[in-house]
């Protein structure tokens, strides 16, 4: 319990200061959006530091692809949205200030299609777009700051332990805070309306929202899931469902898109579970075989799937991963390179090929891919970790230190990054271009530390 509360109390200390400096309302104010984003990023980085965010690239790729399809219908977008999976089996989703949108693993497991998951994500995008979260924090005339902070703690604790989070959340709601509940209900209607419009414009089946409401209603009346956190923060009543049904009818749109949602869920289970039962689809059975180290059996299943749909990223990545376990690296490399011709520059594929090439001692080939990734994804820490290892293998100490410095900088360890750049500046034989870049980066970090 202490381990759970300590990070939350640290977050509350930050939030107490942040509430006094909240930006004023205004979607198009760059200054306001920057300050809002800082608040959301701080919470996101803490969740990441506590190991609560799923970092598997292909899973991250899927959920962000869904999110950015929805964002395509958003006019005058001023936020850089970030979608992520929370490693928690409670049914929940939430939007942080600045466009950081989290979806719990438990909610993903309950949804049956990409359209149902997209309905939740569209709803959360609408909350951010309409600045509901920021406006809630400003309603100090109806809800005091202490209550807001207690509720924030409850929401975050709900992602760690649903019972503890619920207790804190309900404690914050007590004592005459019914105004917050009513305020939230009003926002839910508004977010549903905007969410359905985003789904419609993005080509999703808008019935997905009503279908997911049905799932939530069923779960709330059973013991199948211990507490529905999503319903506590997103009230769902008959009037809200009826209004959504009417709006969906006026925005009716089916979808002929290929839906790999079940493959996404299967791979999420593979990444999340210590043990899997070998039953279900051939893909799920193959993943379970890999989990139990039955690589030959997995190879037979995945080879057939790959042959029938070798442009399918889920089959291809699982097949290549198993080939690596069978020590058939050349075949795995061929699968990855074929995928990259179909999906040029894809991070999930590239990072796996990069790792394979490094393990095989093909450091120059690995360096070529890593440099391309550095340009395309400059905020990805694992790229700089890989670069530092590659430069070490190639005997390039200055570039190794600079890659390590960038890794620590992105990880928030500015002092260590500065020390590494100091080491670069005193190395012998470093060329003028590298020295100049090191000095510039060092100065930027010193300014950031101030």
Image (cartoon, rainbow, N blue to C red):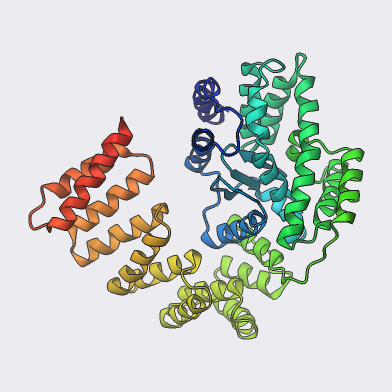
| Relative height, residue 262 to residue 71 (above, below) | below
Residue 294 seen in the current view: no
Residue 51 relative to residue 356: left or right: right
Residue drawn at (81%, 57%) of the image:
206
Q: Is residue 123 in view from this perspective?
A: yes
Question: Residue 53 versus residue 121: which sits nearer the camera?
Answer: 121
| Of 344 and 249, the residue lying toward us | 249
State the residue at coordinates (59%, 81%): 310
Q: Residue 275's x, y, as percent?
A: 62, 59
Judging depth in this view, the residue of 72 and 218 nearest the camera is: 72
Of the 4 image quadrants, the one containing the N terminus is top right
Rendering quarter of residue 169: top right
104 vs 293, nearest the viewer: 104
Residue 168 spot, x, y in % from top left: 67, 24
Q: Residue 79, position in %: x, y?
A: 55, 45
At which x and y percent is residue 194?
75, 46
* In the image: residue 5, left or right of residue 213: left
- Quadrant where the C terminus lies? top left
Asked if residue 413 is positioned above or below residue 261 in the image, the reply reads: above
Left or right of 248 in this view: 7: left
Above or below, comparing residue 318 to residue 44 in the picture: below
The residue positioned farthest toward the left in the image shown:
428
Number of dots carrying numbers: 0
**Taking 240 as reference, is 371 above or below it?**
below
């Amino acid at each position: 319990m202490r381990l759970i509360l300590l990070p939350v109390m640290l977050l509350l200390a930050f939030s107490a200061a942040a509430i006094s400096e909240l930006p004023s309302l205004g979607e198009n104010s760059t200054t306001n959006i920057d300050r809002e984003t800082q608040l959301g990023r701080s919470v996101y980085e803490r969740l990441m530091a506590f190991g609560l965010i799923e970092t598997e690239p292909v899973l991250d790729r899927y959920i962000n692809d869904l999110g950015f399809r929805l964002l395509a219908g958003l006019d005058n977008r001023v936020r850089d949205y970030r979608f992520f999976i929370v490693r928690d089996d409670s049914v929940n989703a939430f939007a942080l200030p600045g466009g950081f949108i989290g979806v719990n693993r438990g909610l993903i497991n309950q949804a049956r299609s990409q359209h149902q998951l997209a309905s939740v994500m569209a709803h959360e995008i609408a909350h951010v777009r309409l600045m509901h979260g920021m406006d809630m924090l400003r309603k100090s005339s109806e809800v005091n700051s202490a209550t807001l902070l207690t509720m924030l703690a409850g929401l975050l604790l709900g992602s760690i332990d649903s019972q503890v989070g619920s207790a804190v959340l309900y404690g914050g709601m007590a004592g005459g805070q019914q105004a917050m509940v009513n305020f939230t209900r009003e926002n839910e209607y508004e977010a549903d309306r905007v969410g359905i419009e985003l789904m419609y414009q993005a080509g999703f089946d808008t019935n997905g929202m009503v279908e997911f409401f049905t799932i939530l209603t069923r779960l709330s009346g059973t013991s199948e899931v211990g507490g529905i956190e999503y319903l506590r923060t997103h009230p769902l009543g008959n009037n809200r469902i009826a209004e959504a049904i009417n709006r969906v009818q006026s925005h009716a749109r089916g979808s002929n898109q290929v839906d790999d949602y079940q493959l996404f869920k299967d791979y999420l289970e593979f990444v999340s579970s210590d043990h899997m039962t070998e039953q279900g689809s051939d893909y799920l059975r193959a993943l379970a075989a890999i989990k139990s180290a039955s690589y030959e059996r997995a190879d037979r299943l995945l080879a057939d799937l790959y042959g029938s749909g070798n442009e399918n990223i889920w089959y291809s990545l699982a097949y290549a991963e198993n080939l690596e376990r069978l020590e058939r690296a050349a075949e795995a490399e061929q699968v990855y390179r074929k995928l990259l011709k179909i999906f040029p520059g894809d991070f999930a594929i590239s990072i796996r090929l990069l790792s394979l090439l490094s393990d095989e001692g093909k450091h120059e080939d690995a360096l070529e891919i890593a440099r391309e990734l550095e340009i395309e994804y400059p905020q990805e820490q694992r790229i700089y970790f890989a670069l530092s290892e590659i430069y070490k293998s190639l005997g390039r100490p200055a570039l190794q230190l600079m890659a390590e410095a960038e890794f620590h900088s992105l990880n928030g360890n500015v002092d260590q990054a500065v020390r590494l750049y100091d080491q670069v500046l005193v190395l012998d034989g470093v060329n003028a271009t590298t020295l100049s870049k090191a000095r510039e980066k060092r100065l930027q970090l010193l300014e950031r530390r101030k």
